[in-house]
Image: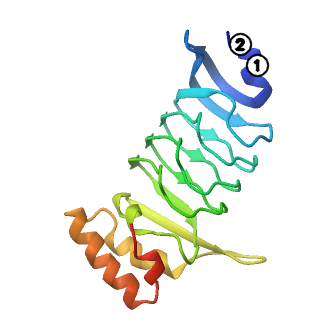
Amino acid sequence: MLTEKEIRTYFNIDGDIHINKNDVIYVNGDADMIKYNDRIPFQFDEVTTEFSCSDRGLTSLVGSPSKVGTGFFCYGNKLTDLVGGPVTVGDNYSCFNNPLVSFKGAPDSVGGVFYASYSDNLPMLSLLKYNKIHIRVANVNVVTLAPISVILNEYVGKRPLRQAIIQCQKALIDAGYKENARL
């Protein structure tokens, strides 16, 4: 049986921890991963405020809570997709500075801004379901908003979604982002 002490060896928890009979964790508060690991060592169900597993060497988000009340932060890892991450995030979702090749596994719902890093071959059209997108370009000393963000944000949240995707796809291709103009 999983114990609170075991959880606290990997996570700084600011709030209450509840562990069900299947060792699935509910946190009424924040959970911040403090140990380096290639995976999240436990299965979370819900974290009511923030969940952070940033800069921990993760190659998978399996074990993440399915629901996060405010922010979900998984930036600076070794993730190639977002499979295993939350389905619902109440505020911001930050996955920049990962070698993503797809947004497979991205949440169904993000209440705030979806943050990611630009890559030449990363399909971007699936992000149009969100309210706001920030695609970042990092160089040696400065992180700036990628020009592709301006195009994407013209079409985010527009309905019908299929029509918005088709229009955005054309705009991306016209602007030279052919490889990003995919789902």
Q: Identify which amino acid the numbered label 1 is placed on.
A: Glu
Q: Residue at x 62, y 18 (%)?
A: 17
- The relative height of residue 15 versus residue 77 in the rendered view (above or below) is above
Q: Which mark is residue 166?
A: none
- Secondary structure under badge 2? loop
Labelled pair 1, 2 in contact (Cβ < 8 Å): yes
The quadrant of the rendering that contains the N terminus is top right
Gap between marks 1 and 2, in whole Å? 5 Å
Residue that badge 2 annotates: 3
| For residue 90, above or below residue 147 | above
**Snapshot quadrant of residue 44:** top right
Q: Is residue 99 left or right of residue 148?
A: right
**Residue 129 appears in which quarter of the rendering?**
bottom left
User: Which residue bears the numbered disc 1?
Assistant: 6
Query: Which x, y percent locates residue 28?
Result: 56, 23
Give x and y (percent) for residue 81. Answer: 56, 54
Query: Residue 16, image x and y in percent?
Result: 62, 18
Q: Nearer the viewer, residue 91 or 137?
A: 137
Query: Image check: 123 left or right of 31?
Result: left
* CA neighbours of label 2 inside 10 A, class few (<14), some (14 to 19), many (20+): few
Few, some or many residues within 10 Å of mark 1 (<14, 14–19, 20+): few
Which residue occupies 47% across, 51% down?
106
Report the quarter where the C terminus lies.
Answer: bottom left
Answer above or below: position of 48 versus 83. above
What type is the residue that disc 2 sits on?
Thr
Task: Say above or below: 33 vs 163.
Answer: above
